[in-house]
Image: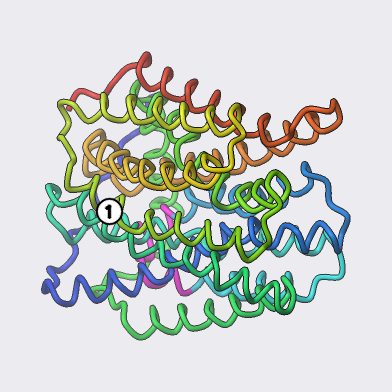
Amino acid sequence: MSARVPAPPPPCAALSARSAWGMLLALSCGFALSQAFRSTTAIMATGLRADFALSAQALGVLAGAFAFAFGAMQLFIGIAIDLYGLRRTLLAVSPLTLAGALLSALAPGYGVVLFGQVLIGVGCAPAFLVCTVFIARHFEPARFAAISGVVMGISGLGLLLTGTPLAWLVQQSSWRLGFGLLAALAALAWLLVWRQVHEAAQPPPAAAARAPVRDAVRGLGALFLLPHTAGIMLLALTTYASFLSLRGLWLGPLLIERHGYSLLASGHVALFASLISLFSPACFGRLDPGPATRRRWLVGCTLLLAALFAAIGLLQREWLDVGGPMAVALLSGYMVLQYADVRSAYPAALTGRAMAAFTMALFLGVALMQWVTGMAASLAAARGVEPYAAVMLSIALMLVLGALAFKCLPAPAH
């Protein structure tokens, strides 16, 4: 029996433009905080490795724990948003971010930090999805890519925090204080959403809530039965993962160990790359060519990104290792076009679940790529090969495979 597509949710009450933007700004602050948490390892790596004697592979697992928990929760978060609304879902789940940050700050060993990262990943899981669903519900479809680009730019403020400011704080004190600061910001973000975000009144879940949940799960089945879903998800596994693996994990260790940079100097490079990433999504959002040629843009930009990573891995030049992350941050803005592609590839009844599945693929891809690159670095070091060459070439290869899957598998009939 084929999966039944659920009926679309009741339309949301219209919001004034001012109210909609105010709520979206509050939601974007939570998204910015999740960006900060997912990129801390690049700055805290040196201290964590020194305190807990971590290998490169263990460091990759630690960085991937957040992304795995974040991605694995997306389908459940999508169902919760459909049934209980954005506000209630976010306020119920996000306190785990505070708990995980405090646990990490006080951790006596690697295992506790790892568990703390899992809690943080679960707590941050709604942060991205609530923004995309809110945009889809309250703004015109033609503006989806442009507004998503603005939100991604705002969220990049979290990356700025984990550049020079966090590097300075960690260098002056320790990585534990860094987690303590992020815990305080998590509490403030929760209070902002509680104060600012208020949805229109929705009917409470029916007493027999199993039927809506069952319908939601069937909707996911309908999503994955569509032939074009595979290519979309396989590309999603590689694109954002490439940027975050560089910016959130390997940038600091690469500059410190390959070129002798201090932690603060590597933080400056991370800061400039993050500044660029603030604006590139909005620029690409405005350049969105539309459904007719958008997929060709996605393939071309992904292959160009792969070439950048291959150059960083093979040439091992200081100017490229500093300028390359800037170029990656600039080009990575094209990833906002993936959201527009997903938005136009599925019927309105599947929008929430399509975004949830897409976000799941993005962050499971981050976990996969950080684990693969950590393993590649450990294997290369054991064989006397420069580990960061293996890391960058692994990222380049995964990007090429993602682009080929997207190009060769069936496309949606827009």
Viewer-nearest residue: 199 or 43: 43
In which quadrant is the N terminus drawn?
A: top left
In the rendered image, the vertical position of residue 410 relative to residue 202, given as above or below:
above
Residue 25, located in which quarter of the rendered image? bottom left
Taking the magenta stretch, the answer to whether it contains residue 309 is no
In the rendered image, the vertical position of residue 302 relative to residue 78, given as above or below:
above
In the rendered image, residue 277, in percent from the top left (x then y), is placed at 38, 54
In the rendered image, residue 210, in percent from the top left (x then y), is placed at 46, 53
- Residue pictured at 39% horizontal, 56% vertical: 129
Q: Residue type at mark 1: give it.
A: Gly
Q: Which residues are magenta?
A: 78-91
- Residue pictured at 30% horizontal, 56% vertical: 279
Viewer-nearest residue: 191 or 220: 191
Q: How is the image coloured?
A: rainbow
Viewer-nearest residue: 318 or 412: 318
In the rendered image, the vertical position of residue 204 relative to residue 38, given as above or below:
below
Residue 111, located in which quarter of the rendered image? bottom right
- Residue pictured at 31% horizontal, 82% vertical: 196
Viewer-nearest residue: 408 or 403: 403
Question: In screen coordinates, is 294 left or right of 208?
Answer: left
- Specify the principal SS of the magenta part: helix
Residue 48, located in which quarter of the rendered image? bottom right
Question: In screen coordinates, is 286 left or right of 262?
Answer: left
Taking the magenta stretch, the answer to whether it contains residue 85 is yes
In the rendered image, residue 337, in percent from the top left (x then y), is placed at 28, 40
Q: Residues within 10 Å of mark 1 (few under 14, many from 20)?
A: many
- Residue pictured at 63% horizontal, 47% vertical: 250
Secondary structure under badge 1?
helix
In the rendered image, residue 115, in percent from the top left (x then y), is placed at 74, 60
Question: In screen coordinates, is 227 left or right of 266?
Answer: left
Name the residue beneath numbered marker 1. Answer: 149
